Amino acid sequence: MITDLLNWLESATSSPWFYLAIFAIALFDSVIPAVPSETTMILGGIAAGQGELIIAVVILLGALGAFAGDNLAYQLGLRASDFLKRRLFSSEKGQARLAGAAAQIEKRGGPLLITARFIPGGRTAMTASSGITKQPLDWFIKWDAVAAILWASYAGGLGYIFGEQFADDHTKAFYLAFGAALGVTALIEVVRWIRHRGQSQSADVL
């Protein structure tokens, strides 16, 4: 089924309907990880580089679809949180695991959301977990918007700039995207650590 979808996508990039496919696949990939959103974005970028699509629209619709899908996964996790806590996290160990996940999200949630956006399956786990642990919606929307824009810009840009180099090698494009996400996360963590250290030293002086 996935192979048939990929074949159709490759043959449909010159059609204006491909814009709708970009939005829909980016949305569903946040809930159903098997849907190939990275491949779709790269194909859209390649088509834009060949003059068949407009790269700004490809990136915009990819980001909007990803953002909508992530928020759907968040809402599903939020609305099912009490049920899941009773069914899956009722034991002492389960509650400790859930508390640990909540603590990590609260401490590093923003960078984790960015990194997870580049990992098929990871984005669903992270967005749903944010809902299950009842993270603030305004916090989630802010960081997820950044993650969706970065993901769509990078994936679409890869296809647009490098074109046919990634047309038959989406794995290479994925590793580059994932590496970029880790780099951004590492930079954010270093800045956060420096700021935390500076605040701690100021507190010690006072």
Image (tube, helix red, strand yellow):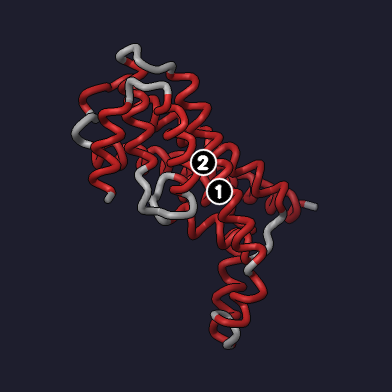
Rendered image quadrant of residue 136: bottom right
**What x and y, as percent, mark residue 25?**
43, 41
Q: Give the amino acid type for the residue marked by disc 2 in the picture.
A: Ala
Task: State whether residue 129 is above or below residue 65.
Answer: below
**What x and y, as percent, mark residue 185?**
48, 44
SS category of the residue bearing label 1: helix
Q: How many marks?
A: 2
Residue 33 left/right relative to 142 = left
Which residue is painted at 48% across and 54% down in the image? 31
**What x and y, as percent, mark residue 26?**
46, 41
Residue toward you, 159 or 58:
58
Residues under numbered marks 1 and 2 in contact, where contact means CB atoms less than 8 Å apart:
yes
Residue toward you, 179 or 171:
171
List the residue tagged with mark 1: 70
Task: State whether residue 122 is above or below residue 42.
Answer: below
Residue toward you, 161 or 70:
70
List the residue tagged with mark 2: 66
Task: State whether residue 91 is above or below residue 61.
Answer: below
Which residue is painted at 71% across and 51% down in the image? 137
Task: Compute the Cα span from label 1 to label 2.
Answer: 6 Å
Task: State whether residue 50 is above or below residue 10.
Answer: above
Residue toward you, 15 or 50:
15
Mark 1 is surrounded, within 10 Å at the Cα level, by few (under 14), some (14 to 19) or many (20 or more) other residues, namely many
Residue 108 left/right relative to 4 = right
Residue 23 left/right relative to 108 = left
Which residue is painted at 56% across and 67% down in the image? 101
SS category of the residue bearing label 2: helix
**What x and y, as percent, mark residue 191?**
57, 42
Which residue is painted at 54% across and 42% down in the image? 188
Q: Give the amino acid type for the residue marked by disc 1 in the picture.
A: Asp
Mark 2 is surrounded, within 10 Å at the Cα level, by few (under 14), some (14 to 19) or many (20 or more) other residues, namely many
